[in-house]
Image (tube, grey):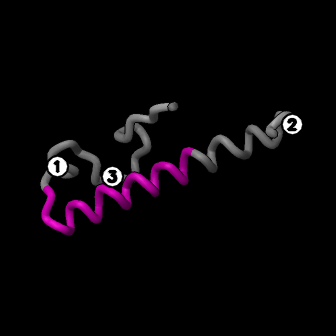
Amino acid sequence: MLTDPLALLLFLPALIIAITIHEFAHAFLADRLGDPTPQLQGRLSLNPLVFPFRLG
């Protein structure tokens, strides 16, 4: 898998960016379809800190 330290250093930022964009897309579409929850929770942002990252 990711045994090379350089590969890991390149993979982790890419993973964080991908998850952030993915979760933002969920929030954006929910907001556009009339669900106020993303706006109320402050999730309409590309800031990765507003999306709790859960493993598992």
Horizontally, is 28 left or right of 21 in the view?
left
Q: Of discs 3 and 2, which sits in the foreground?
A: 2
Q: Nearer the viewer, mark 3 or mark 1?
A: 1
Give, as a three-letter code, the residue at label 3.
Answer: Ser
Taking the image as shown, residue 35 lies to the left or right of residue 10, namely left
- Residue 33 lies, with reference to residue 3, above or below; the image says below
| Local secondary structure at mark 2 | loop
What crowding class fits label 1: few (fewer than 14 Cα within 10 Å), some (14-19), or many (20 or more)?
Answer: few
**First along the sequence among labels 3 and 1:** 1
Q: Is residue 27 magenta?
A: yes
The residues colored magenta run: 16-35
Crowd around label 2: few <14 · some 14–19 · many ≥20 (10 Å): few
> At label 2, which amino acid type do we have?
Asp
User: What residue did someone put label 1 on?
Assistant: 37
Q: Which residue is mark 2?
A: 4
Circle 3/circle 1 CB separation < 8 Å: no
Helix or strand or loop: what does disc 1 sit on?
Answer: helix
Q: Which residue is mark 3?
A: 45
